[in-house]
Image: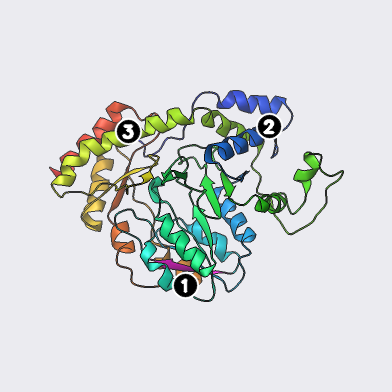
């Protein structure tokens, strides 16, 4: 079976984890956490970066930092993972869903303004497949209505929009280091802060509401409980695993990009014949080869294609079920405007195997099998 995903391993993970154990520091905010924080901050030119236990928790932390309260509304696409909505629903806010663009599967920036009410507090663009949303327009709307912009860049590390790294364009960005992402620590994430003044508050919330981070830096002689908070710190073992991959981030990027480009070139003929649609990357956007998807004609054809691939030893999968169609989505959210593309486009999309180390023989088998299905 050719797997859809294989978690990345570069070879130094165990050595760094062993070093953390021997250093007798395996809880959060040790040597490897700091190395990862600094690497991401320098790579993205962020004012502040903090590793978290997941992208879900990074988004929850963002919701707290933006003081999301019961009755607030937060605008987002319905075509996203549940965590995008959960982070705000947990604060008592309503998720306001708007339609997506069929070309990128990202939120349709032209529909956001019509969804704004006096209760709107934030906009959450989700950069699907590491391809940026139209951030200039989104920021323009946010400034007009004094709204926060929280980027769900779970899939967007080392992708960019007009030269800016995804996750650094809005007020706050959130990364994922889940095992399905380009760079992994099993479960994990990071929050990126554009405003350095937010960093101290984020540290306090992340450290159970204490100022312990200041204590560890020697800025105060004791720490205490100063605000409401929680525990969003990953262990040093997770951070050590991630550090190995950040050291080879360019190698992972280039390997995935080569596989992505190979798919694109090999399947272009089917797209020209109108059999499938391929991913679209707008001008000014630099993606990160997070995934390669194709779009079938409709749900029935997609179902047949996935079954055909499975019969031939290939695991290909669809993606999100639109949140507004889910029981919790109907309870905690509302779809504003018309669902022209969210449902229909989500029913067509198939993700092909793509991961660091995908060998050319396996990829050729995937390509040939897709072609045989359509031929």
Q: Mark 2 = which residue?
A: 31
Which mark is first along the chain, 2 or 3? 2
Q: Position of residue 102 (x, y in %)?
A: 29, 58
Considering the numbered disc 1 on the image, is that residue within a helix, a strand or a loop?
Answer: loop
Relative vertical location of residue 250 with respect to residue 99 in this rendering, above or below: above
Q: Does the segment drawn in magenta span residue 76? A: no
Q: Which mark is residue 356?
A: none
Q: Are the residues at dot 1 and dot 3 in contact (C-beta closer than 8 Å)?
A: no
Q: Are the residues at dot 1 and dot 2 in contact (C-beta closer than 8 Å)?
A: no
Q: Quadrant of residue 23?
A: top right
Image point (50%, 51%), residue name: 169
184 horizontally vs 101: left or right:
right
Q: Mark 1 = which residue?
A: 116
Which mark is first along the chain, 2 or 1? 2
Query: Distance between the Cα atoms at labels 1 and 2?
Result: 44 Å
Q: Position of residue 21 (x, y in %)?
A: 69, 28
248 horizontally vs 107: left or right:
right
Considering the numbered disc 3 on the image, is that residue within a helix, a strand or a loop?
Answer: helix
Q: Mark 3 = which residue?
A: 259
Q: Which residues are magenta?
A: 93-98
Image point (28%, 27%), residue name: 361
Main SS, magenta region, reads strand
Q: Position of residue 278 (x, y in %)?
A: 25, 46
Mark 1 or 3: the one toward you: 1
Q: Does the segment drawn in magenta span residue 94? A: yes
Q: For residue 362, say whether it is visible.
A: yes
Relative vertical location of residue 148 with respect to residue 19 in this rendering, above or below: below
């Amino acid at each position: 079976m050719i797997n859809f995903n294989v978690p990345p391993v570069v070879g130094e993970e165990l050595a760094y984890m062993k070093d953390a154990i021997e250093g007798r520091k395996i809880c959060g905010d040790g040597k490897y956490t700091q190395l990862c924080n600094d690497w991401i901050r320098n790579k993205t030119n962020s004012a502040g970066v903090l590793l978290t236990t997941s992208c879900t928790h990074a988004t929850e932390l963002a919701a707290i930092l933006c003081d999301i309260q019961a009755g607030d509304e937060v605008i987002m696409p319905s075509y996203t993972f549940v965590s995008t909505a959960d982070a705000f629903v947990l604060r008592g806010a309503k998720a306001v869903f708007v339609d997506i663009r069929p070309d990128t599967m990202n939120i349709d920036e032209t529909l956001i303004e019509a969804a704004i009410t006096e209760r709107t507090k934030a906009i959450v663009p989700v950069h699907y497949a590491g391809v940026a949303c139209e951030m200039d327009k989104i920021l323009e709307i946010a400034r007009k209505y004094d709204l926060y912009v929280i980027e769900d860049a779970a899939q967007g590390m080392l992708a960019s929009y007009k030269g800016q790294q995804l996750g650094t364009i809005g007020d706050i960005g959130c990364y994922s280091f889940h095992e399905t992402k380009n760079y992994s620590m099993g479960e994990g994430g990071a929050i990126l802060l554009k405003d350095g003044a937010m960093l101290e508050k984020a540290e306090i919330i992340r450290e159970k509401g204490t100022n312990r981070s200041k204590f560890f830096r020697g800025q105060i002689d004791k720490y205490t409980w100063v605000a409401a908070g929680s525990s969003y710190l990953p262990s040093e073992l997770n951070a050590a695993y991630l550090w190995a991959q950040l050291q080879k981030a360019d190698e992972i990027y280039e390997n995935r990009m080569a596989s992505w480009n190979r798919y694109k070139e090999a399947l272009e003929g089917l797209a020209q014949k109108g059999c499938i649609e391929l991913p679209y990357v707008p001008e000014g956007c630099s993606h990160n080869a997070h995934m390669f998807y194709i779009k079938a004609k409709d749900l029935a054809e997609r179902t047949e294609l996935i079954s055909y691939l499975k019969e031939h030893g290939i695991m290909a999968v669809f993606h999100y079920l639109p949140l507004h169609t889910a029981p919790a989505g109907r309870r905690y959210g509302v779809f504003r405007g018309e669902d022209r593309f969210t449902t229909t486009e989500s029913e067509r999309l198939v993700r092909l195997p793509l991961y660091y180390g995908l060998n050319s023989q396996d990829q050729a088998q995937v390509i040939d099998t897709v072609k045989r299905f359509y031929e």
